[in-house]
Amino acid sequence: MIRRPPRSTLDRSSAASDVYKRQQVKSKSKLFSSSSTEFGSGPNSQVSLVDAAMPGMLPVINKFCVEQAVRSGIGLNAQINKKSIFDRKNYFYQDLPQGYQISQFKDPIVGNGFIEIETDGQSKKVGIERLHLEQDAGKSLHDQDPNLTFVDLNRSGIALMEIVSMPDMKSPEEAVEYVKKVRSILRYLDTCDGNMEQGSLRADVNVSVNKPGDDLGTRCEIKNLNSFKYIHSAIIYEAKRQIKLIESGENIIQETRLYNIDSGETRSMRSKEDAHDYRYFPDPDLLPLILEDDWIKKIRSSIPELPDQKKERFIREYSLSEYDSSVIVSDKSTSDYYEKVVKDRNPKLVTTWVTSELFSVLNKKNLSIDESPISPNHLGELIDNIDSGKISSRQAKDIFEEMCETGESANNIINEKGLSQISDEGELEKLVDNVISSNPENVEKYKNGKDKLFGFFVGEAMKLSKGKANPKVLNELLKSKLNT
């Protein structure tokens, strides 16, 4: 989860935010039971006796989920606490069969850390206050019947990591970049799939405003934002709402609010004083969690190359710009795709085709890079043909379009349609001689200073070659012949 949003300058005040990020731990089983976590299964089909809180059923910690939390903490440059405690957070809701949620309060598994974000070309550190493990509740379904509420306990007991930021963000853009960066890091670590549509990652945003130089004002929390667009819009609306109240002489009431995606407004959900009285106390069924140094070191040694390190390597090895490198490494699947294509190839050409042509197709078709209609091998094959001069850039775009539609390789399309460029100097020289001997008047005019006629000769030669002449070689031969 994300719970704290950024501060932004709006009207005559400043809006501060922090983000709480709730993310589902990538694990095949739940935090305290062996039930499956597979998405999309039938209602109440993945519920053990522990998940349903049957009498006498005791929780057993999932070691893999603990390891995933530690990996995430290391990726967030955070302190790993060798001793942490699971608490019972008591509240009633129909989809919470135990009557309490097992979570961590005063002693979380991960302490202070930080990540770096970039907005408008400026780098900034955002502090991480903590990461703690907790179990999810079930799901109440209010739209299945006009008079009844149904409860699905498939999510009951699924492991969550709640990541709480410091109130270091000062604009909606910074909040969005923070969420994107955390999501990217966790996907590189393979500790969360980051799928916001399926609820694997949700954000709660605290927004408060203040006049420049004043302390932060009363904050309001906006719950369960599940897209970057909604995070951005909700912060803007809420900051403006608070500014309007202050400038009208009214007070901000600390409360929890919901964001309406249709109206673009936030509305009150419940009042919230300094904190809810959840009556936290250590769970008597779970001993304190003690981590050994050697185990933490083993996990630390297995941490893969993360976005910031990969960005620097791409700049160094492939001479990419800061911007291109940031775009490519922001998503692990994209960076993996890029590295498969760029191996032993021209990085400049590869970057252009991935970030311009391929991204354009994916955006139009609303596809992820994993769903790309063109494989890394096929794109690499196309780029090889461009780099060798076998096809022109113009031909390459036509071939690329056909590759997207048919899934065929570049070589197959080139061979089937006879699209190879003519690059043989001897063959092109015959074309050039033919064009020059057929147009003596224009040759004379060109030699007398009408340089614009050069395009005429290029066009005539291209007609004779049926568009297959290598433009670079053709231009060089024409200049040489016409200027002698």
Image (tube, rainbow, N blue to C red):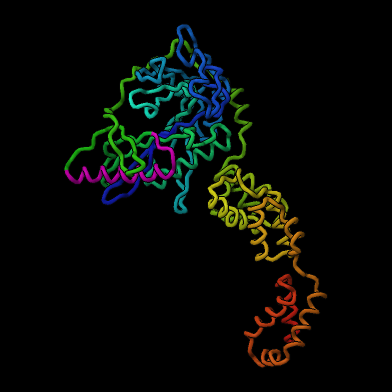
Whether residue 166 is visible here, answered yes or no, is no
The location of residue 107, given as percent across then percent down, is: 44, 21
The location of residue 56, given as percent across then percent down, is: 47, 6
The location of residue 85, given as percent across then percent down, is: 46, 18
Q: Is residue 345 magenta?
A: no
Main SS of the magenta segment?
helix
Q: Is residue 241 magenta?
A: yes
Say which quadrant the N terminus sits in.
Answer: top left
Name the residue at 49% across, 13% down: 50
The location of residue 460, given as percent across then percent down, is: 70, 80
The extreme front residue here reads 146
**Taking 399 as reference, is 230 left or right?**
left
User: Could you say which is closer to the camera, residue 132 or residue 356?
Assistant: 356
Name the residue at 65% across, 61% down: 398
Q: Is residue 281 above or below residue 456?
A: above
User: Could you say which is closer to the camera, residue 127 or residue 371?
Assistant: 371
Name the residue at 73% across, 81% down: 478
User: Could you say which is closer to the camera, residue 208 or residue 382?
Assistant: 382
Q: Is residue 195 above or below residue 354?
A: above
Whether residue 458 is visible here, answered yes or no, is yes
User: Could you say which is closer to the camera, residue 324 or residue 236?
Assistant: 236
The extreme right residue here reads 426
The extreme left residue here reads 249
Q: Is residue 469 above or below residue 432?
A: above
Name the residue at 43% across, 21% down: 103
Q: Which residues are magenta?
A: 224-248
Quarter residue 21 falls in: top left
Q: Is residue 51 above or below residue 407?
A: above
**Taking 357 as reference, is 124 left or right?**
left
Say which quadrant the C terminus sits in.
Answer: bottom right
Quarter residue 438 falls in: bottom right
Quarter residue 472 falls in: bottom right
